[in-house]
């Protein structure tokens, strides 16, 4: 494997190591940018600190500022907003000497800052059409498509350049990783796993390729295989900046086969972020895991309190609906009525007045799910069902992955069971069992629905199936 940052020494003209033109004519600055991009791609180190060091030496390096602004878009947190805008402003002061690729990156982040996330994707995509080797543009489009729930886009951003990339081009393993995840989200599981494992053969400590395999295992219900795969490689991905999310994936396998002690073991060792500073992405996973384990009737002690403490300052952000639903999850679970009201009121006001890309996400899915969670915790299970049933096939608009959004379908099913709407519950549980027949949880739900309908024979059969999966 050739390290991305080593290759640019060989160039004769001022391009990056993949031949993409750079207007700033200094090899050291360009190498520094490559190091920062590689950190972002490999989930290692601090890419922003790296580029800051380069920019301190080379303040005229416009692509450095554009990397910083572009990478900060992915945080989806208000606390970094001013830093992102400041980096974009610095780039804006240097547009006169910029090339068309750099102007494209500038326009993309500008669209983002104006709340037009979809416009930002289009600008980055336009750069990619002209410069298919622009790995940074590909990375930003792919991740933004994940944030926005554009499922086909996650795959096709790579497909559009598929005949141009080859293993000799630095960063090929990252392209494979993006494609593998995009294929997985589009349910092309075999191809996804093949490419992810190819990426891992090139770079064994590639967390995003591990992640693509983890998703394949999750969607196909290969729980024990998933646990083994993750454990065997934990020494490599466990030290990356993606470790929390990968531990979350590992916990999901255990949850599916009712190994709750293992779930809490992982939560307490790797997802409990009470000692860390506020990284929202980590707290998303922690909240979502606790909600799921509560759905199966397990208590979680004081764990919600710490998470709700972390989310409460962000209650009125209205920045990203995906964040808001996880904040609400903690508020309803820790019985923080005031924080719930704050979040809901802020969102109502925001929906009346704003027109940015998050409005649709929030209106169509974010708010219905927030209200449904409140209903669930207030034991108004019928209301919870009525809110979620009409939106269940629109949930991709919330962003994230199928595995993350499955929390909505699971909440709907549990609410249907508790509302004693057993015919609906059976239909929903059957859907889940058809998609993932190796989940003990899914068979438990089938059994409860049959029992509610008075069909003890089918209920007993479903319980036996669940038991066999736990013992397997
Ligand atoms: Fe994931």
Image (cartoon, rainbow, N blue to C red):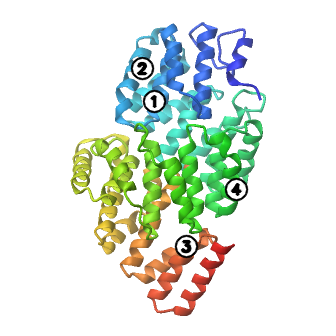
Q: Nearer the viewer, mark 3 or mark 4?
A: 4
Q: Which residue is mark 1?
A: 72
Give the x, y percent position of residue 231.
67, 51
Coordinates of residue 121 in the picture (x, y in percent): 49, 35
Asked if labels 4 and 3 touch by Cβ distance under 8 angstroms, the answer is no
Name the disc covering residue 228, or none: 4
According to the picture, the residue beneath numbered tag 3 turns out to be: 442
284 relative to 128, above or below? below
Distance from disc 4 to disc 1, alpha carbons, whole Å, reads 34 Å
Q: Secondary structure at mark 4?
A: helix
Mark with earlier residue (3, 4) = 4
Residue that label 2 marks: 87
Label 1 sits on a secondary structure element that is: helix
How would you rate the neighbour count of disc 1 (Cα within 10 Å): few for under 14, some for 14-19, many for 20 or more? many
Discs 1, 2 touching: Cβ within 8 Å: yes
Which of the pair 300/410 is nearer the observer?
300
Sequence order check, earlier mark of 1 and 2: 1
């Amino acid at each position: 494997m050739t390290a991305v940052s080593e290759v640019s020494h060989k160039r004769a003209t001022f391009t990056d190591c993949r031949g993409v033109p750079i207007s700033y004519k200094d090899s050291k600055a360009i190498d520094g940018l490559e190091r920062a991009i590689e950190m972002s791609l490999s989930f290692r180190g601090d890419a922003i600190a790296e580029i800051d060091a380069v920019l301190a030496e080379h303040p005229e390096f416009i692509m450095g500022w554009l990397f910083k602004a572009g990478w900060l878009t992915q945080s989806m947190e208000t606390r970094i907003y001013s830093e992102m805008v400041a980096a974009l402003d610095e780039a804006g002061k240097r547009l006169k000497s910029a090339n068309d690729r750099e102007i494209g990156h500038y326009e993309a982040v500008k669209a983002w800052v104006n709340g037009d996330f979809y416009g930002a994707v289009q600008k980055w995509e336009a750069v990619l059409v002209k410069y298919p080797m622009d790995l940074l543009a590909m990375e930003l489009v792919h991740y933004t498509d994940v944030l926005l729930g554009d499922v086909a886009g996650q795959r096709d951003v790579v497909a559009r350049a598929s005949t141009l990339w080859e293993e000799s081009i630095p960063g090929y393993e990252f392209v494979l990783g993006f494609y593998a995840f995009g294929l997985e989200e589009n349910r092309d599981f075999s191809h996804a796993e093949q490419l992810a494992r190819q990426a891992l053969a090139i770079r064994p400590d590639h967390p995003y390729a591990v992640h693509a395999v983890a998703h394949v295992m999750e969607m196909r219900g290969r729980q024990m295989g998933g646990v083994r795969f993750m454990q065997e490689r934990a020494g490599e991905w466990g030290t990356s900046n993606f470790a929390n999310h990968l531990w979350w994936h590992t916990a999901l396998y255990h949850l599916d086969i009712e190994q709750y002690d293992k779930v809490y073991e992982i939560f307490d060792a790797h997802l409990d972020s009470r000692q860390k500073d506020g990284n929202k992405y980590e707290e998303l996973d922690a909240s979502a895991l606790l909600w799921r384990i509560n759905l199966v009737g397990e208590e979680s002690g004081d764990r919600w309190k710490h998470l709700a403490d972390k989310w409460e300052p962000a209650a009125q952000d209205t920045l990203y609906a995906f964040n808001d639903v996880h904040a609400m999850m903690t508020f309803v679970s820790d019985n923080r009525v005031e924080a719930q009201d704050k979040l809901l009121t802020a969102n109502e006001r925001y929906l009346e007045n704003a027109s940015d890309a998050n409005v649709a996400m929030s209106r169509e899915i974010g708010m219905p799910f927030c209200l449904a969670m409140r209903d669930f915790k207030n034991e108004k299970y019928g209301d919870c069902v009525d809110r979620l049933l009409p939106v269940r096939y629109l949930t991709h608009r919330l962003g994230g992955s199928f595995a993350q959004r499955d929390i909505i379908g699971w909440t709907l099913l549990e609410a249907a069971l508790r509302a004693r709407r057993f015919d609906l519950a059976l239909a929903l549980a059957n859907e889940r069992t058809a998609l993932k027949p190796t989940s003990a949880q899914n068979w438990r739900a089938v059994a409860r629905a049959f029992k509610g309908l008075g069909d003890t024979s089918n209920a007993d059969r479903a319980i036996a199936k669940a038991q066999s999966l736990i013992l397997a």
